[in-house]
């Protein structure tokens, strides 16, 4: 039954976005800088990661026991969608931050 639900999900627009996101997540991104070394890279990567996380915090809705199961499901889907958008925004912010520091994606 679970596998049928997954198959149905990947036939929807949201499912396609999730599938591409999973595939994109498997691709390793390498960064290089013409003058800086590994220690500088580790420092800059941590700084950009922290800034991106602070700029786009996680979204969560508090549990509300008065909601019926259908409303709880809608709330869960909203939260999941909001966090998917947050992840994309964080990734873009991180990339821009690294490029602003002079790094180039390889």
Image (cartoon, rainbow, N blue to C red):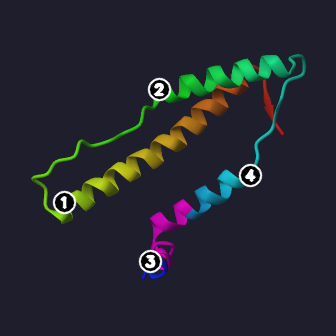
The residue wearing badge 3 is 2
Earlier along the polypeptide chain: callout 2 or callout 4?
4
Q: Residue at x 86, y 17 (%)?
A: 36
- CB within 8 Å, label 4 to label 1: no
Which residue in the protein does label 1 denote?
71
Say what secondary structure mark 1 lies in. Answer: helix
**Residue at the location (42% across, 32% down)?**
57
Q: Earlier in the sequence, mark 1 or mark 2?
A: 2
**Residue at screen point 51% across, 29% down:** 53
* C-alpha gap between disc 1 and disc 2: 29 Å
Quadrant in the rendering for residue 39: top right
Camera-nearest label, 2 or 3: 3
Q: Which residues are magenta?
A: 5-18
Is residue 67 rendered to the left or right of residue 38? left
> Could you say whether the residue bearing mark 4 is in a helix, strand or loop?
loop
Determine which residue is flagged by label 4.
27
Q: Are marks 2 and 3 in contact (CB under 8 Å)?
A: no
Residue receiving disc 2: 55
Which mark lies nearer to you, 3 or 4? Answer: 3
Quadrant the N terminus occupies? bottom left
Q: Secondary structure at mark 2?
A: helix
* Horizontal side, residue 2 vs residue 31: left or right: left
Q: Position of residue 55 (x, y in %)?
A: 47, 26
Q: Quadrant of the C terminus?
A: top right
Between marks 1 and 2 in the image, the one whose residue lies nearer the viewer: 1
């Amino acid at each position: 039954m679970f596998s049928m639900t997954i198959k149905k999900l990947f036939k929807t627009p949201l499912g396609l976005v999730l599938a591409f996101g999973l595939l994109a997540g498997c691709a390793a991104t390498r960064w290089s800088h013409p003058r800086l070394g590994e220690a500088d890279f580790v420092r800059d990567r941590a700084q950009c990661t922290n800034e991106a996380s602070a700029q786009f915090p996680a979204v969560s809705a508090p549990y509300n026991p008065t909601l019926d199961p259908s409303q709880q499901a809608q709330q869960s889907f909203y939260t999941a969608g909001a966090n998917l958008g947050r992840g994309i925004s964080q990734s873009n912010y991180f990339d821009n931050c690294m490029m602003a520091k002079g790094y180039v994606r390889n």
